[in-house]
Image (tube, helix red, strand yellow):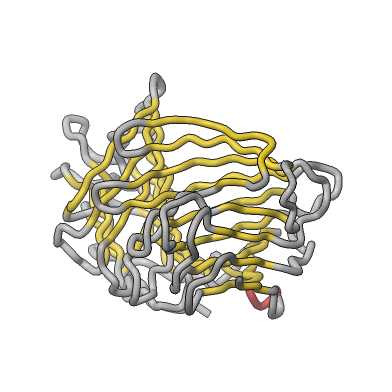
Amino acid sequence: MPILGTQASQISGHLYAPTGSMFHIASTTLSTTATDVTFGSIPADYTHLQIRVMALCSATGYPRLRFNSDSATNYSYHFLYGSGVNAQSGAADTVTFMQNTYAANATNPSVSVIDILDYANTNKYKTMRSLNGQDSNGSGFVWLFSGNWRNTNAITTVTFTPETGNFNAYTSISLYGVK
Amino acid sequence: MVTVSPSGNTTAAVTYTPIATNTFSSTQTTITFSSIAGTYKDLVLICNVQRIGTAENPSLTLRFNSDTGNNYSMTNLLGNGTSASSNRNSSQNMMNLSYFSMPSSNSFAPYIINIMNYANATTYKSVVSRGGAAGSGTQATVGLWRSTAAITSVTLTNDGSPYGMSSGSTFTLYGIGA
């Protein structure tokens, strides 16, 4: 059923009944600080995963992503970012995590939309891309990432870890499956 | 450490739900999605916009809850076909999502705007979007609204042009559940 009666000023809108191929799998909103957040027992029912993040962190850093608790040097990534002053690009390979966002403080949320493609396929390495950023009214970054996990296992676990410090309360992370 | 496991019947958890949509049948200067319930986790606003008039350099701008205070800021990553660059605006009275001039004929400028955790009444609100304008450039933007109020209305305006956005411009608001 439609949830709300949205209307547009000067014009008229209309409502839809819900349809689609995107499914909510699991979510957490932290009630206190946490050293990491793990989504476990991810079913292989979907084609792709999407993770949507609003992160507040106790320290400046780059939250990290790992799959299936793999802490070996099987990750690589490229990025393009804007600092508000200039645009730069970089990369890292043979590293023990996938960097995918930037978080600066506990007040201004860092937000990310992360797509993990063909996560359940056991014949290919896994790839992700993300759009994210944080603005702090006078500072901040916006990022495009793409990354590779050199492993053919189906992804069943995704773990987020701050580079330093903790995720603060009200950090909210949701996992979705896309058919 | 927090561990989250799947729960529920995925058949019942379908999301990315269309909330409301509009296609301009005539020139308009503003569109407002109002009475937005706090039912979802995130909002996604997909726009395909064309401007009226070629002399101006109008921007697609966003306001929440009709707030006209200087509570908005944004950081842009830009590519114009020749080089990449970045800029920012601080303490603005609206969130500018289009650095490049929107097309005025034939083409439309696409924007996909993610409004994250819009209904919480504790944190500031952050937005991340991708957009571009055919013939001008492409961009990614992160924006901040320094308010802890739950977002209940979203207003889009083509700031800087007295002529408005053209017929055929489309705007659809989706809810992402959790």
Where is residue A152? Give x, y as percent. Answer: 82, 46
Q: Residue furthest right?
A: A123
Q: Vertically, is A63 above or below B175? A: above
Residue A93 occupies quadrant: top right
Q: Which residue is at the front of the view, B22 or B73?
A: B73
How many discs appear?
Answer: 0
- Residue B168 visible at all: no
Q: Vertically, is B102 above or below A59? A: above
Where is residue A58? Give x, y as percent. Answer: 42, 63
**Residue shown at 29% from the left, 53% from the top:** A136
**Residue shown at 39% from the left, 34% from the top:** B107
Where is residue B158? Give x, y as percent. Answer: 23, 47
Q: Vertically, is A148 above or below A118? A: above
Q: Is residue A38 left or right of residue B118?
A: right
Where is residue A34? Give x, y as percent. Answer: 53, 70
Locate the C terminus of chain A and report the quarter of the image it occupies.
bottom right
- Residue A117 visible at all: yes
Q: Is residue A17 left or right of residue B24?
A: right
Q: Which residue is at the front of the view, A157 or A26?
A: A157
